[in-house]
Image (spheres, rainbow, N blue to C red):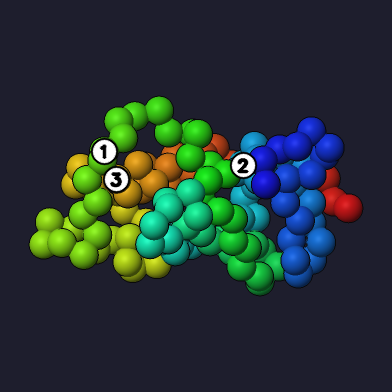
Amino acid sequence: MRDTGDGHFKTCSQCGFVWESRESFLKDPALKMIGYQVHGEDQREGLFLFNHDCHTTLSLRAGHFLDLYQGPMFQARLIGTEACPGQCLRQGDLRPCPEKCECAYVREVIQIILNWPKQPVATRR
């Protein structure tokens, strides 16, 4: 679901609103990130959840946003261990993870999305 250059990144399944690019999606104040559903084996397959002002929830694979992160990548997977604070297992918990876990970078991407500057999007289709 990357910006394909054809004027389409995501369409709201409820109201039909079209975001032409990932940037227009991220800056739209009508969207609010509400959660993350972890994927057990591949972090790119996890789902970022967004509420749209039309009262629907949209999901996008985390892989569409992971290139926003430029920091360290850790190899150890801590989910299910004593060291894991369990944030990835709580869908609505959007806080960063303090551990050096392979999943921690997804938590950093969440912070990038949450702090993305918002501007009204005027295009409707």
Query: Tags 2 and 3 in contact by the CB under 8 Å rule?
Result: no
Residue 63: x %, y % from top left: 53, 46
Amino acid at pointer 1: Phe
Q: Nearer the viewer, mark 2 or mark 3?
A: 3
User: Which residue lies at the image location 30% right of the left edge and 30% below the top edge?
Assistant: 72
Report crowding for label 2: few under 14, some 14 to 19, many 20 or more residues within 10 A (C-alpha): some
- Label 2 close to label 1 by CB (< 8 Å): no
Closer to the chain start, of discs 1 and 3, is 1
Residue 61: image x %, image y %? 55, 53
Above or below 77: residue 34 = below
Taking the image as shown, residue 118 lies to the left or right of residue 70, namely right
Q: Earlier in the sequence, mark 2 or mark 3?
A: 2
Q: Secondary structure at mark 1?
A: loop
**Name of the residue lying farthest toward the front:** 41
- Point out which mark residue 27 bears: 2
Residue 26 image-quadrant placement:
top right
* Residue at x-position 34% and y-position 29%: 71
The correct choice, above or below, for 38 with respect to 24 in the image is below
Give the numbered dot on residue 58.
Answer: none
* Image side of residue 31 versus residue 72, left or right: right
Q: Disc 3 residue type?
A: Glu
Residue at which label 1 appears: 74
Q: Percent x, y for residue 4?
A: 75, 37
Discs 1, 3 touching: Cβ within 8 Å: yes
Query: Which element carries disc 2, helix, strand or loop?
Result: helix
Q: CA distance from mark 1 to mark 3?
A: 5 Å
Image quadrant assignment for residue 84: bottom left
Left or right of 123, for residue 86: left
| Residue where numbered disc 3 is placed | 102
**Which residue is at a point 67% across and 40% down the rendered structure image?**
2
